[in-house]
Amino acid sequence: MWLVGDTGQLWEGWLERVPAAHLAADEPAARSALSAAAASLGVALLLESPGEVIPLPAASAARHRPVAAAPGTLHFDPYSVAFRCLARGDEPDYRTVLRYLRHGWLTLEEMDRLLEDVLPRFTRETIAQDPAEFRRKYRGLCQMWLEQVNNRKPRPEGQPTTRTLELAPPREGV
């Protein structure tokens, strides 16, 4: 079983709550058991692997992270989750990816490297959008991250601060 996105971030203590438990499991029996458990507890469940939605980057399984105090449970590869979030592109998805960056689970350099592998496999059919739209979303995320990083640097006394972007539409050509 894998914790995916916000659910893994909740486990790590980065969030206080999530709207639904986002889990992934390979075995049909495990998927059924998770669905039944969620239903009996009245918990909303999103049972989806990023690999069901987008082509995964090479060696994604090697980047799964063990979940502390939960043997046999892993955090799904954060790079795969980030690319899935970007493909969907909702405001909460951008926040998920920015939290991964903030906590050091992702770097832009590694994302760039992995995108070299995965972008040629992105088609309108595999990601349900024009690959150019995905690239635009990625550039927008990079811009948001760099603005957040720049806003965290110490400022000389008296210099005004600027607000951190939560979600801003990317500018063309950036």
Image (cartoon, grey):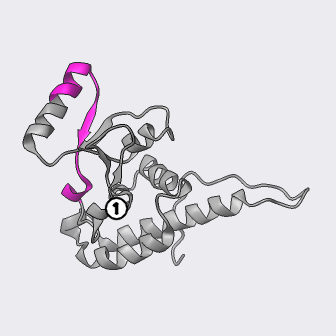
Q: What residue do we see at 40% from left, 77% from top? A: 113
Query: What is the magenta range?
Result: 36-53
**Residue found 28% across the figure and 30% down from its top:** 44
Tell me where residue 174 appears, x and y as whole percent: 54, 75
Query: What amino acid is labelled 1 in the image?
Result: Arg
Q: Quadrant of residue 159?
A: bottom right
Local packing at callout 1 (Cα closer than 10 Å; few below 14, some 14-19, many 20+) is some
Which element type, helix, strand or loop, lies under badge 1?
A: helix
Please tell me whether residue 132 belongs to the stretch shown in magenta.
no
Q: Residue at x 32, y 58 (%)?
A: 84
- Near-viewer residue (37 or 66): 66
Q: Measured from the top left, where is residue 153 in percent x and y?
A: 74, 61
In this rendering, would 92 be left or right of 26?
right
Q: Is residue 34 above or below residue 170?
A: above
- Relative placement, left or right, of 108 versus 126 is right
The magenta stretch spans residue 42:
yes
Give coordinates of residue 59: x percent, y percent: 28, 69
Residue 119: percent from the left, percent from the top?
A: 31, 75
Residue marked by disc 1? 63
* Residue in the picture at 78% in, 55% down: 161
